Image: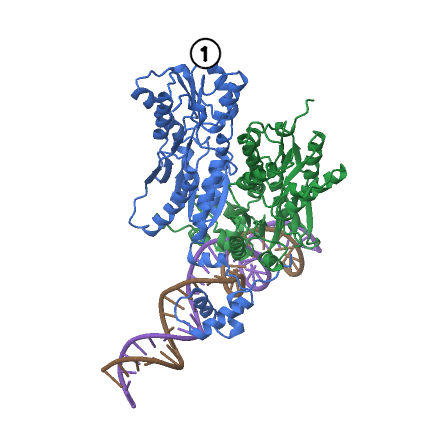
Chain colours: A blue, B green, C purple, D brown
Amino acid sequence: MKPKKRTTIYDIASKLNVTPSSVSRALNNTGYVNETTKKLILKTAEELNYKRNILASNLRKGESKTIGVVVPRINQNFFANVIAGIEEVTYKKGYNLIICQSNEEYDKEVQSVNTLVNQHVDCVIISISVETNSDETNNCRHLQNVLDHGIQLIQFDRVADELETLKVINDNEQASYEAISHMIDQGYKRIALLEGPQNLAIFRQRKNGYLLALEKHGMPVIDELVIENAWTKELGAEGTRKLLGLAEPPDAIFASTSDFSALGVLEVAMATGIQVPQQLGICGYSNEDFTELTYPSITTIDQYSVNMGKTVANLYFQERENADTVAVSKTISIKPKLIIRSSTQRLKE
Amino acid sequence: MKPKKRTTIYDIASKLNVTPSSVSRALNNTGYVNETTKKLILKTAEELNYKRNILASNLRKGESKTIGVVVPRINQNFFANVIAGIEEVTYKKGYNLIICQSNEEYDKEVQSVNTLVNQHVDCVIISISVETNSDETNNCRHLQNVLDHGIQLIQFDRVADELETLKVINDNEQASYEAISHMIDQGYKRIALLEGPQNLAIFRQRKNGYLLALEKHGMPVIDELVIENAWTKELGAEGTRKLLGLAEPPDAIFASTSDFSALGVLEVAMATGIQVPQQLGICGYSNEDFTELTYPSITTIDQYSVNMGKTVANLYFQERENADTVAVSKTISIKPKLIIRSSTQRLKE
DNA sequence: TAATTTTAAACAATCGATTGCATATTAAAA
DNA sequence: TTTTAATATGCAATCGATTGTTTAAAATTA
């Protein structure tokens, strides 16, 4: 690590006997610069291996050209895909991404968001942690703080509903509704629900879709078939054991929280010799890669995650364009898609 | 988006009738500041919701406290895990991560690396794309360029061997050797190899391990059992069809490139009614989540990816400490672990 | 040819924080 | 009481790029 001094516009300027301003204009292709000198400057810049100091540039211009992203976990398929989508768009625009993970912890989320504000990012993109209870008002102060600093805030997927920001979400209720309808079509009569922490809107919406579908098809809601807080593989398995132990066990389970909990369901079913999908239908949520590979493959809901990332990023740039004219609050809803696989198909076509 | 003006140290200074220097000293806890005024400054900073402008600070200090990471794909399990590991360490040190994906394209990799140099990151962490042929010297100019700018460069997993940098790798040869030895133990006699692009060292090493194991066990190397460039699921499937069509087909396949190609093998086997592991043994590489879930589950090699990320990050900070005294080139090798699952176990214990 | 416009390039301020140096004040030591 | 050291704060330069204002030169028009 030799701390080699970087070439600056001053180096170029003094070498060519012009002023730094001219160099800057030449490099940025703005204002007046003689064609000959411009070429000379560009050539010298190349020769001296000049790289613009973005820090200085951004400081002067008052922007950071950086977007901060906070997700619960980077290495979770859905989020990794969203980030990949965001990156694809922002990279083209010359923006950088700063990635943080909250590890599903409220404190780390707050800390991460504060760091980003500190960094003067131009925009914060976030999917809140499970601990971030959006009902208790104070718990979203860190997000309000982002707005107070004049920084754009975009929430996606797991959003704090009452906060007036840009949002990109899935139509969870609709997806959920379709999943249940499909299961009813397949002749399942007692459909159980594994629900997630109800402080997160997405899980409330998925439950609503479930309730709505039952109602529309004239089926009763049976309380004992609704299992709270079953959002990991282990909790999903636990819930399943409880359900299967009922006097009247369900003939289908909708693991509305994730494919991981659906996997938990499947494993318990396999272990206890219950036939899927004949005796028990299973539907997950998220279309994780593995759902296609299990035996039987798992019916699930695709959230178009990469596409969601692109939508988020595009939304930012779009809002930036007409920054003055536009309302603060806006929600884009992406319709997810039910992917029907073996785990719920008990009727032959 | 009201373009609210941010509070600066000047605002605090003028409000309290002190100089910006004093404010700076108070906030940084450096130099002499009267205890009373310091408290006052801190309190006022809090009140005015002051956040240090990192751009200005870093510009002045000549560092960016930012680390750039370039990987082929963010949303690939292995890389997502490595990034998660890196993030965990760097976050604690107050560093930011800029993430880029090369999409396995040489051009985008070069562009990404240049962007990072442009950003004056303190360190570039990279796993090169498959197109980055490390043999053709010019193809690594972008990496040399990083070094030339006095920026630390750390390569991991897919490294350009001949470049003298810090490296964190797996002992691919050893892992490969163990995998083949295990298969031989299980009584497989004709073990095929799906190999990856040989311009990447990792794939050469894995092949070496294969060759070495055969040799050590006195088994012949059969050319027609080595399939070049079979590193995606599709290519893996294609290679498998070719292998199974041989006059003397193999009784085991080592998909040394990835679990994805192993999956391709498995699917072809299933489709043609070949029993795994009885008639055909299969071993993958990387321990992707799904390898545990397929039927039968796939034997594979765990690379300790999150841990690898942490190692990389720690290596950076460690080298930074003794920046002057230390050699430029250094390699840390992590021993991966063979995970034996159903797809290669045809002997009952 | 004089007046006007266009083009070229220099000058200097600015973005916000940091820091070496200088000055002033206070406390401690001689 | 004087000298010396410690403390507190101000001043001004600096990091590197950008940009509004000026001045100067060249090109165009009247």
Q: Quadrant of the C terminus of chain A?
A: top left
Q: At label 1, which amino acid type do we have?
A: Leu
Res B45 visible: no
Left or right placement of residue A111 versus residue B240 in this view: left
Q: Position of residue B68 (x, y in %)?
A: 55, 50
Q: Does C12 appear above or below A347?
A: below
Residue closest to the eye, B2 or B27:
B2
Side of B207 where A190 appears, left or right: left
Give the residue at the far top of this rendering: A247
Q: Position of residue A229 (x, y in %)?
A: 45, 23
Give the number of marks: 1
Quarter of the image for residue A306 reads top left
Residue B75 image point, x, y percent: 51, 41
* Protein chain holding label 1: A
- Residue A139 to residue B221: above or below: above
Q: Which quadrant does the N terminus of chain A fall into?
A: bottom right
Residue at left 57%, top 40%? Answer: B236
Q: Which residue is mark 1?
A: A246
Residue beneath the point at 46% across and 74% down: A37
Q: SS of the residue at dot 1?
A: loop
Front in this rendered view, residue C27 or A319: A319
Residue B13 visible? The answer is yes
Assess disc 1: are there few (<14), some (14-19) or many (≥20) residues with their C-alpha within 10 Å of its C-alpha. Answer: few
- Please state the horizontal and vertical placement of residue A183, each as a whole percent of the image: 38, 22
Outermost residue, front side? B247
* Among the 4 quarters of the image, the one containing residue A310: top left
